[in-house]
Each structure stands twice: as C-alpha cells, then as structure tokens.
Amino acid sequence: MKPFFVLIIFLVTTTLSAHVGDHSPDRGIIYTINGKEVEGHFLMSRDDKVFIELPNGKVVSALINDFSFENRESLSEKIMVLKELNREKKEVTPNRPINCLLAFFLLIFVSLLLFFISKIENIGVTKLTVICAGIGAFLFACKTTETVVSPNSNTSTIITKTDPAFIEAVYSPFKNSVKTRYDNTYFYIESNGIPTHNMMVGITSWQQQVPIPQDYTGTNAWSIPLNPELATIPLSLKTNFMKGAVAIAPNGIPIFNPLNNRGEDAFAIGELDKWGGHCGRADDYHYHIAPLHFETTAGNNPIAMALDGFPIYGSKEPDGSTMLPLDEYNGHAYKGSYHYHATTKYPYFMGAMRGKVTLDPATTAPENQIIPQAKTSAIRPAGEPLKGASISDFKTTGTNAYSLEYTLNNQKGYVNYSWDNAGIFTYTFIGTDGKVTTSKYTRK
C-alpha cells in the first residue's frame, strides 16, 4: 500500500475515534429510577425527560418524576442552571446522536474516496470491503442508543383525556345516593356526605364529633379533572394537603390525607373507625385511608378517584391481575397512563400528588388544599377530645336520627341526635355520670 493511502486511513480513523463524550472509566452518580438503581452522569433535560449517560456510553432517559425524591432535588438544580444558560437559545438535541449521524455521512464519503483510491492503487475489492466494514463496525460500537426506563415494560407514560364513562363506572354502584355529571373540564360528584355503611365504631381517639349530612351538590359538588397531567415535582402528602380532600370514594365520601392536620397517622393513633373514616370539626364524615372494602362492589374498576384526575385501584390491577410493584407515590405507570393503589400500610393510597393540581392561595403548607374543593357546613361549635373514650356502637334510631354509644372508664355515654326538613338539629348528650344536656342548632 502506498504511503499516501496509509496516511489517509490514519487521518480518517484518528478523526472518527475522537468522538464527543468518550467512554470515561470514572464512576457516576447512583440514580433511582422507578425503584431501579442506575449509575451514570447527567447529560441533559428535554421535554420533562432527563437523559443519563451510563458508564458504557449508552444513554437512558426517564421523566423527572420517575426519579427518587433525592435525585429530583439535585436534578432540578441542574436543569434550572441549564435553562438559565440557554434562556435565549433554542433547545439543543443531544450531541452524541448528531455526531453519529455526521459520522455516517463521513463514512459514505470515505467509502467513495477509498473506492477511487482503489482504482488508482489497484487494491482488490475484498480488501476494500474489509476496510470499510471495519470502519462501519467501529462507528456502530460508538453509537449512542436511547432507552426509556419505566416499570411494567412501558416505554413512556402518555396521558390523554379521561373518558367520563370510565369515571361513571366508579360511582355507578352507588347511583341511588350519588349523582354525577360532567363538562369539558371536570367530572362532578354529588352526595349528602353520609355513607350507606355503618360509621364511627372502633374509634379510640374521639373529638366528640358525629356525622351529619353535607350539601355536596350543585356548585359545591366534588370535581375530578378530565385532563390529568403529570406534575413536574409531585407534592408530598407528608408536607402538603393536611386540609381538605385529596380523593373521592365511590359513595361520594371525600378521602383526606392519611395524616391529620397535626401530621399524625390518623389510622395508627385510633382516630378512624372500622371503615377508615371519622368526622371532622364540621361533623363531616370522611375517610383518611382509601377504603379497600369497596373492592367488593368495584370489581375491576377503581375504588376512588384522586383530585389530580388519576384513579385509585385496590389490591389488583385493572385487568384483575396481581398488583405490580409500586413507586414511592403508591402507584405506577400502566398501559400509557398512571394510577395509584390502596394498601394496608402507610401511605395507604398515595405518597404524593402525582398529577398537577391547583392550590388554594388562601392556604399554606402543610395545611394547603386543592381547589376546586367542596365546602362543609358546620352547625355547632367543634367538640373537644374526650381522652380515654372509645366508640362502641352507632345505630339508626329513626328517620334522620342516630345514636352514638361510647365507653369511658367502663361507663356508657351517649350522643342522640336528629334533624328535620327545616334544618333544625337536636343533640342530646348523656354523660357517663348520667347528666343529660340538650342543644338545638339551625343550619343556615
């Protein structure tokens, strides 16, 4: 082979081997993506996706929400720096795929050049083919491929508008007590706030509240977004939403944060009854855990809908199969969308609000709340904790009339109450000492 030809081959191979982003031997950062650990270096961010370069030169990408809380904090800082640097520039695609494309055209050019040189230098076709194949193999080995890391073999999570019929199926088992409607933005759920199952029995930490009807109708109905969107940084329920509902059960009863407004696990400290609920300061009954007892009537449908628009399933997947591994939000991507699951351990149904929500500007964390939010209506001053009391019975005594029995120091006490069509509520308190007190209140 003539020196001239050797020089060309040397220059070409040297140029191709000096590709951008050489395979560095140093160790990268450990990222946790959907529960899987990946070692690599932050490469770039585009369209809510983060690109991580692995030690072998490959690139993996995932939505920033798929990373662990710790990773998202550091990644968000890096993304903000990049946005500031590129504030006046268009988004740039990753360099490595562009270089490989340029290298492909360079390969064509080199191949043509080699062909003409072979004619001049009288190099055989076989030898020329081997040289070109070697260069092509080298380029292929340096090629950067992109894969999406996500659970359940999903390549991405694509959120589309929710079919109102899908949500309708969630609430249809209780159509005698729940009314529904929808527009282009929200699916609305109306109820009186009183479940058809029994209530209050089993509570060992009681604030002397009892369930009365609430007017969750008309403009005060519960609202489920029909166009859910994944949040860039989901808001944790450990530090947010300790006021108001975060989901609505199929019987029209709101579901609150598993933590009470003091940041305590309401179930663990005995505030909840056998059905996962209790009454708030407005005598409003609500759950603090997603009630798994609704699985019986739900079938393969969700057992609740979150106020970010994503469904909450029970212990099974939508097709009835065994529940797949959950992410840190107590949910996962599934067939192009996202849903939560109710479980028997904290966080019970959601660790963070995976979807975008609008916050009430009049509230601040941790007692911030989602809007639109149906309002409750109190008709009497809030009760006080009755230390040591446990609720042993709760029953219907007539039309719009109930009796709650509690036990304190092995003595029985009662709260008997009722209301009429004029909105007048009568409460009769019978203490463990036998003292009777009656009060009337009018709902305005």
Image (tube, grey):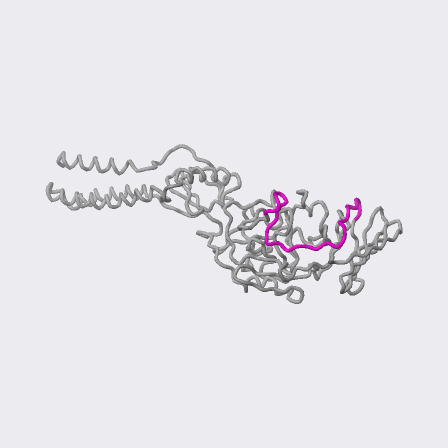
Q: Is residue 1 left or right of residue 168?
A: left
* Extreme-top residue of the structure: 26
Residue under the image location 17 percent in, 46 percent down: 112
Residue under the image location 69 percent in, 45 percent down: 268
| Residue 158 vs residue 11, the one in the foreground | 158
Residue 242, x across and y down, in percent: 64, 46
* Extreme-bottom residue of the structure: 176
Residue 171, x across and y down, in percent: 61, 63
Residue 342, x across and y down, in percent: 61, 52
| Residue 364 vs residue 269, the one in the foreground | 364
| Residue 159 vs residue 364, the one in the foreground | 364
The answer to whether residue 215 is above or below residue 289 is below
Q: Main secondary structure of the magenta part?
A: loop
Residue under the image location 43 percent in, 33 percent down: 27
Q: Quadrant of residue 135?
A: top left
Residue under the image location 25 percent in, 36 percent down: 15
